[in-house]
Image (cartoon, grey):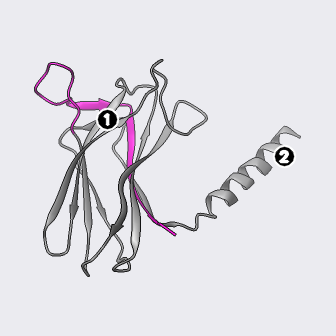
Amino acid sequence: MKVRTSLLFLGLLISCASCDKNGVFDEYKSVGNAWHKDSIVHFNLPKLEAGKKYNLFLNVRDNKDYPFDNLFVIVSLEQPNRKVLVDTLEYKMAHPDGSLMGDGFSDLKENKLFYKEKFTFDQKGNYKVHIQHALRETGKVPGVERLNGITEVGFRIETTE
């Protein structure tokens, strides 16, 4: 009976996940067990409707080995005309008690982090996204060489309607 209930729950979960009507792009890249400071995660975006508004998100999967309460990233959005929009962003990753934020039932958590709201892809052509971590320990100039606990980095685009 337990196996049957578990399978029913799993099937329901999968069917709910596939009912994502707003998502137009959702891709993850593995960074292993730690994200190296020189490792840049790249995404080639699909061609999107010009003039339409989209919400853009970074997705980060982390686990109990993540030692910090925040995450700094540098996100570069490369446009077809070679112009690059660069943002340095900070996200809160842990509650005050040290427990990780995000969705998940186990030690693995998934965080959907807002990047740009109501963004329009005005130019025709290929857009690319490049994401690199920029975390530094307090009082230290060099960046954290290997950011433990980050397992995957993703990028998501949703329609605003």
> What count of labels does the image hold?
2
User: Would you say 55 lies left or right of 85 here?
Assistant: right
Q: Which mark is residue 71?
A: 1
Quarter of the image that includes the N terminus: top right
- Give how far across and how far down residue 95 sits, in percent: 46, 25
In this view of the protein, which residue sits in the foreground, 104 or 138? 138
Residue in the picture at 84% in, 38% down = 2
**Image quarter of residue 116:** bottom left
User: Is residue 5 located in the magenta-colored stretch of the structure?
Assistant: no
Helix, strand or loop at disc 2? helix
In this view of the protein, which residue sits in the foreground, 51 or 58? 51
User: Would you say 123 lies left or right of 10 here?
Assistant: left
- Give how far across and how far down residue 134 sits, in percent: 21, 38
- Give how far across and how far down residue 155 sits, in percent: 38, 56
Q: Which mark is residue 122?
A: none
Residue in the picture at 67% in, 58% down = 16
Is tag 2's residue or tag 1's residue first in the polypeptide sequence? 2
Q: CA distance from mark 2 to mark 1?
A: 40 Å
Neighbor class of circle 2 (other Cα within 10 Å; few <14, some 14-19, many 20+) is: few
Q: Which mark is residue 4?
A: 2
- Give how far across and how far down residue 122 sits, in percent: 27, 77
User: Is residue 152 located in the magenta-colored stretch of the structure?
Assistant: yes
For discs 2 and 1, the disc positioned in front in the rendered view: 1
The amino acid type of the residue labelled 1 equals: Leu
Residue in the picture at 76% in, 48% down = 9
The amino acid type of the residue labelled 2 equals: Arg
User: Would you say 11 lies left or right of 54 here?
Assistant: right
Do residues under tags 2 and 1 come within 8 Å of each other at their CB atoms? no
Q: Which residues are magenta?
A: 134-161
- Check the image and report above or below for 33 versus 8: above
Residue in the picture at 34% in, 25% down = 68
Task: Name, please, the residue furthest toward the left.
Answer: 141
